[in-house]
Amino acid sequence: MVKIGDKVRFLNAVGGGIVRQITKDIAMVEEDDGFETPILIHECVVIEPASSQKSSDTRKQSNIVPVEIIPEIKKEETPVLEISGGDRLNLSLAFVPDDIKKLNDTQFNCYLINDSNYYVFFSYSVHEKDLWKTRYAGLIEPNLKLHVEAFGHEHLNDIERVCVQYVAFKKNKGFALKNPASVEHRIDTVKFYKLHSFKTNDYFDEEAIIYPIVHNDVPEQNIRIPATELEHAMKSKIRQDNSAKRKTTSEHAAQPSAILEIDLHIEELLDTTAGMDSADILRYQLDTFRKVLEENKRNKGQKIVFIHGKGDGVLRKAILNELNTKYKNYYHQDASFREYGFGATMVTIR
């Protein structure tokens, strides 16, 4: 007898399927295409009763092997190996040339050195157009050195003022607090052309220029006068000036500053010119000329003698071109013939 759920085939036609509904002597059979076909019950032949299908399904389910869920194992951090004396914070900025034998044609690498048992969050910034620009920010682990950036000679002027800001801490253990700080350095980029500027050190096999950031917990800060003290001193000076007897302008005429002499002969500026052609030498001399003027631009009345030599006049012409185009507000003339011959130009800042 045909029952709902039986799997049947048709007696007098091709096809078959599973019985889904029975009404009197008509069975609704669902075929493989999903459609239900009405057919007389006596024309259906049962090939698999519904009861055997359920037991087969049960056997299939009983053969399913449960998958064991393996919990994720959290990796533990490797403990930091601390060194004796490392609980005092010591940070330095180091500059290392790729090839110290070719200082005039090599790249330089900047590193932050963490010589302490502390993790340090830090940022490394350079001064550009009255603002600061971050060149690197990140975390340095204890007792390691970290490569911060690489640059060539064409970008030396970009690092004339650098700043390192830092916060120190330890992980998973108690520690003594270290005050966050911001340390600025003025980088003398002329040193990058001089072999003797690079010194042997404890951190690199190569010689390097090293600027301390913090030494034994004490930041290397420029001396700064608090604003309140500065204001007090200025007011005190004003009171003294007002109470003093005024003198004539001639009595108070500013005395001219001592003449500043800058020798631009390349052998006075560099230890070696190996690898430099005449264009490189002239470029370096003009960079030095511009730097001196920039450093003295606020010293009104300052007289600066640039000794360039007579030679073929290339450097002299280049200096005069700079003065006539970029530094028109400065007065210039040939320096004293008795002292310098025809090989010097005197510039007056005004």
Image (cartoon, rainbow, N blue to C red):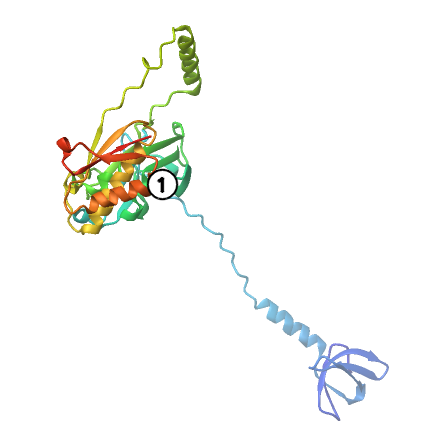
The quadrant of the image that shows the N terminus is bottom right
The quadrant of the image that shows the C terminus is top left
The residue most toward the right is 24
Does the rendering let one see residue 314?
A: yes
Label 1: state its secondary structure.
strand
Seen in the picture, residue 35 relative to 91 is either above or below; the reply is below
Residue in the foreground of this view, choosing between 346 and 108: 346
Seen in the picture, residue 75 relative to 160 is either above or below; the reply is below
Does the rendering let one see residue 199?
A: no
In the image, what residue occupies the spot 36% across and 10% down? 247
Which residue was labeled with disc 1?
Answer: 140
Figure quadrant of residue 299: top left
Please state if 322 lies on the left or on the right of 240 as rendered: left
Residue in the foreground of this view, choosing between 77 and 119: 119
Relative image position of residue 329 (x, y in whole percent): 34, 35
Relative image position of residue 129 (x, y in whole percent): 40, 39
